[in-house]
Image (tube, rainbow, N blue to C red):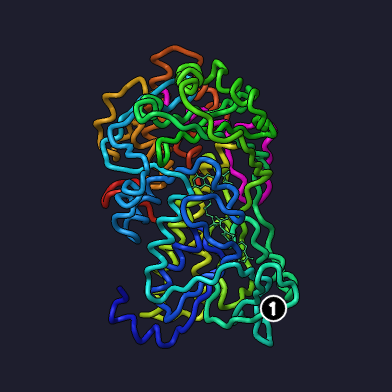
Amino acid sequence: MVKNDLRSEQDQRKQAIVIGAGIAGLLAARVLSEHYGRVLIVERDVFPSHFEVRAGTPQAFHVHRILPRGKMILEHLFPGYRQELLAEGAYEVQHKLATLVKNSQMLQLHPPEQDSSCSRSALEWEIRQRVQMLPRVEFLTNQEVVGLHFSPEKASISGVKLRQRGQVDQITTVRSDLVIDASGRTSKLKQWLQEMGYTLPDEEYVRAHIGYSTRYYKASPELVDQVGTILVDEKADERIPGICVLPIENHTLCVTVYALDGNYPSIDVDEFEQTLKHPHFLSTNIAINLQNAEPLTPPRGYRVPQCIRYHYEQMSSWPAGILPLGDALCHFDPIYGQGMTVAAIEAETLGTALKEQANRPEADFELAVLKKMQDAIAPAWWLSAISDMRGPGVIYEGPGKPQGVKLLHQYIDSYYGYALEHPVAEAQSITSPLPTIAKFFLMNGLILPPAAIFNAPTLALLLEAEAAFGGQQLLHQRVQEYGISPAEILDQVVPQFLFTFVAPAGSNEG
Ligand SMILES: Cc1cc2nc3c(=O)[nH]c(=O)nc-3n(C[C@H](O)[C@H](O)[C@H](O)COP(=O)(O)OP(=O)(O)OC[C@H]3O[C@@H](n4cnc5c(N)ncnc54)[C@H](O)[C@@H]3O)c2cc1C
């Protein structure tokens, strides 16, 4: 329900328009509904009656995981959504098997907390049902936004131009006080701004040439439990793909093979099945188990030639009345499962900014929000970029190119290896320098900052462990190459992130 103290503000801010009813658009509408008298979501698709992949979100065919930080925000915005998904047939992961293979080391877990696992279509459907119930939100489907309505002096945006799909000539203008561009990877925002004479800063790119191939299988409940969730990292330097298996609603297994660097997985049925028999996946028994499952679809592919981060916040003048969010602002290598979580963080950032604006109005509100969104994007972008740069052919373009990636790769491998070999450290507090798998997951889940993993005491510990082990001392060699102290190296290669993580007060990790 809308709080009383926001009423007067709503009278002033009459209508917000959201372009696109994907995850980002739905989450934006949810927070806008607390501040605007009317929120109109314009979507070019017609919604399916149940969990189906729609034309506007073809990526929904492929495995979609949501990170811990994203789940926290979703639970806050839509309390009980996981229970509702379970009631709709989603898979209950509590105490079920999760197998992770990284650097050929296998880890098997049984997550203690209650949680659901489902397709992206089911998650979107659930969130859409909840947004549809909000009194101030309306959907306009089968309508495509084809442009922005600029003020005469082009300094602000006061609405969108849209047309019914298939009706080429009939364009309608709908006025609004704020437009949120949540139209995803196909966003035309850059083009629209350029057409109005705006000069845009360069984007950053990770040209990673990522490929997915996904197939669905129906299995008995027992078989689904036996397989569980599987994540096997790819070995990019050896051109061996990775795999992600997700149990989803209705006793179905979603199996995705992925790889970067142009090593596109096959969508041929026989070749797909053959890939699952690769020795890299042997320890998971996936090929053997799937012999007892019924394929529901042929494999379908998806390619992401590049990941893009727009830097609209660097523009000398930004038009009032428009904000991009979700994939329209930054899209990542999907395998790290960051997109929906970052969209959730951005929606949360927008909600906080709208509340602050109500109390202390700022002149350049949109530009200030854009800067905060960049702070929110930065850690996820850095983590996925350094990981993608393991691919020998992956190219990073842009001023924010991560430094010291070879050292960081070795650091991560040493950290993970140490944590696996010293499970006793798992009981340590997150402020301890001891490497733990839990901290590693929480960093990748955007709960803990990279500094929780990459810090001088932990590096010293890893170097000591390497020396005691008497092995190849690869991390030591990387550190030696710099000729400066470990603390200085970390200052150079690990950026200072301004984003607020969920670290406990008083720790050195916030
Ligand atoms: C293969 C693949 C796998 C992925 N896996 C994961 C994962 O595991 N975890 C994760 O968090 N993220 C994953 N992602 C990313 C994730 O899908 C997105 O980051 C996330 O859903 C946010 O997307 P969005 O809402 O910004 O855009 P989208 O989901 O693309 O939605 C955009 C919406 O806008 C509509 N639209 C577009 N143009 C117009 C227009 N002009 N007018 C009206 N409507 C319009 C579209 O129809 C669509 O409904 C994956 C992406 C890919 C490609």
Quick check: 460 left or right of 400?
A: left
> Which residue corresponds to the image point at 61% horizontal and 28% vertical from the top-left?
236
- Would you say residue 43 is visible in this rendering? yes
Quick check: 75 left or right of 410?
A: left
Q: Quadrant of ligand 1?
A: bottom right
Which residues fall within the magenta stretch?
389-417
Classify mark 1: residues with Cα within 10 Å, few (<14), some (14-19) or many (20+). Answer: some
> Which residue corresponds to the image point at 57% horizontal and 31% vertical from the top-left?
257
- Which sits in the foreground, 93 or 13? 93
Magenta segment includes 401:
yes
> What residue is pinned by disc 1?
171
Quick check: 384 left or right of 345?
A: right
Q: Position of residue 183 (x, y in %)?
A: 59, 62
Quadrant containing the N terminus is bottom left
Q: Position of residue 350 (x, y in %)?
A: 44, 67
- Would you say residue 379 is visible in this rendering? no
User: Vertically, is 272 above or below 247?
Assistant: above
Quick check: 94 left or right of 311?
A: left
User: Vertically, is 355 above or below 406?
Assistant: below
Name the element at disc 1: loop
Disc 1 residue lies near ligand 1 with CB under 8 A: no
> Which residue corresponds to the image point at 37% horizontal and 43% vertical from the top-left?
90
Magenta segment includes 479:
no
Q: Position of residue 27 (x, y in %)?
A: 44, 62
Which amino acid type is marked by label 1?
A: Ile
